[in-house]
Image: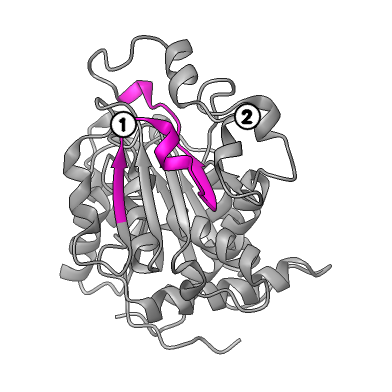
Amino acid sequence: MTAPSWTRRHILSLADFTPAEYDVILQTAASFREVLSRRTKKVPALQGQVVTNLFFEPSTRTRSSFELAAKRLSADTLNFTPGTSSLTKGETILDTAKTYLAMGTDLMVIRHREAGVPQTIAAAMDHLQAGVGVLNAGDGQHEHPSQALLDLFTLCVLLDAKQPRLALLEGKKIAIVGDIVHSRVARSNLWSLTASGAEVHLAGPPTLLPKLFATYGENRPGSLHLHWELEPALEKADFVMALRLQRERMSQHLLPSLREYHQQFGLTHDRLRLCQPQVRVLHPGPVNRGVEISSELMDDPQVSLIPQQVTSGVAVRMALLYLMGSGRGG
């Protein structure tokens, strides 16, 4: 495969991504999606390169997806586990990253509970002129670029499987419901979806959806609307994304009860009657069944795109690693 034009060494945020960059990722992911449908699912695109997964925070989908993506590209993989690492002996995060650099790492995939850690490591690698690419796999309440890109890919493939592209979402109404304030997934999705020209509607209790989120829609091709009730966000929506209540990040009592939250903002088949007839539902996972979304809706193959999101994750992360590791970045 010949790599399309790509100039980024690191992928840390989607805030300044251009439409052309989104389309390069979508088209590259579509090629790898075809590869993954074959009997032999490996390509030698990154053979001889080392991808290190530095996950300082628990993860199932993202970590497994990145590891599988690297292996499908024939890269060697190193996986970091904080509980059994030298961090327990007082080693700093930067020294840990430099240790993996000394082992020959070419690409680092980093997740951390504190915002800014991937950016700090990327700056350190640049200062050392190491030529290492850093990919943000989720940092605190900042961003989660690869999740937003796989969500984007899932939607665009649904609209045009052969040629997924950003422009397909122009004018579409997309509702994002739930714990917006703690969600790095929501922040990254706001950048990508408003770049497409979509009409994005956020819905959640005032404690989980502060007014400051309106600034994400300023000077963007799309529009952004905030709602503290569910119904206006769902009305005539083409797509609906539910977000997990991140109770582990809530430092104060922000909700009366999970039952009341589900009654007001939980997604069910009945509530989706307000949407377009062919509405589809997404959730980045993990899912709290019966809280953000009913089990019946989550398991409905006619409505739920959750399994497709997981599958899309491998193709999109293959695309990101390939573009960053192909020698074009930086």
Can residue 322 be spotted in the picture? yes
Q: In terms of secondary structure, where does tag 1 sit? A: loop
Question: In the rendering, at what x and y percent does residue 286 appear?
Answer: 53, 33
The earlier-in-sequence mark between 2 and 1 is 1
Give the side of residue 51 with respect to residue 315, left or right: left
Give residue 226's quadrant in the image: top left
Residue annotated with mark 2? 270
Q: Is residue 314 left or right of residue 129?
A: right
- Badges 2 and 1: C-beta atoms under 8 Å apart? no
Percent position (x, y) of residue 110? 36, 51
Quadrant location of the C terminus? bottom left
Q: Which quarter of the picture shows residue 1?
A: bottom right
Which sits in the foreground, 104 or 165? 165
Which of the numbered marks, if any, corresponds to residue 195? Answer: none
Q: Residue at x 49, y 53 (%)?
A: 78
Residue 275: percent from the left, percent from the top? Answer: 56, 44
| Label 1 sits on residue | 228
**Residue type indicated by callout 1:** Trp
- Dot 2: few (<14), some (14–19), or many (≥20) neighbours within 10 Å? few
Out of 17 and 89, give the one closest to the viewer.
17
In the shown orientation, is residue 41 left or right of residue 230?
A: right
Q: Residues within 10 Å of mark 1 (few under 14, many from 20)?
A: some
Label 2, label 1: how many angstroms apart (C-alpha)?
19 Å
Magenta-tinted stretch:
224-249
